[in-house]
Image (tube, rainbow, N blue to C red):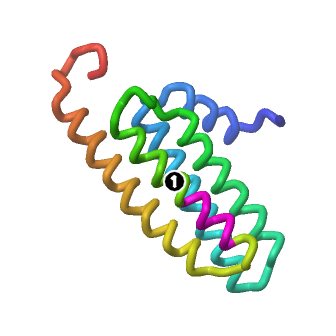
Amino acid sequence: MISTPQNKYLNHTVQTATPAQLLIMLYDGCIRFCKLAIHGLEQNDLQLVNTNLVKAQAIINELIVTLDMNIPLSQDLRQIYDYWNHQLIAANMGKQKEPVEEVLGFLTEMKETWVQAARSINAAKPAGGPYG
């Protein structure tokens, strides 16, 4: 990888991010790739569609493998993520926009939920502590 100022900044951002910030970054990336895939479908650019749906699936797979399955909520999240992957595969195979739009809606809602959770956690932390 070429070391550009942008790559250095991105690398630093990822290395210094909290787990919540990393999760939100993953959601942002997946949302971006879904939007690009929808654009590709609208423009009949099948390469753009495939490339971005595969990238979105890779992010969802990363979300899956990072789940702590000892936490009960993780079982539910795993089912949700599996459904999203299924929808993106179906969209890619059928070159259909609707499944991508459905997943995009879910991603947007879930991201906002995680943003609110991160804010609540940060608000509860005492100032000057190890995280403040």
Quarter of the rendering occupied by the C terminus: top left
At x 51%, y 45%, the residue is: 25
Horizontal and vertical percent position of residue 51 = 77, 62
Horizontal and vertical percent position of residue 130 = 29, 14
At x 23%, y 15%, the residue is: 129
Q: Secondary structure at mark 1?
A: helix
Q: Is residue 121 above or below residue 54?
A: above
Please tell me which residue lies in front, 18 or 80. 80
**Farthest residue toward the top?**
130
Q: Is residue 115 above or below residue 131?
A: below
Q: Which residue is mark 1?
A: 28
Please tell me which residue lies in front, 1 or 88. 88
The amino acid pointed to by label 1 is Asp
Q: Which residues are magenta?
A: 84-91
Q: Residues within 10 Å of mark 1 (few under 14, many from 20)?
A: some
Q: Quadrant of residue 127?
A: top left
Quarter of the rendering occupied by the N terminus: top right
Q: Is residue 10 magenta?
A: no
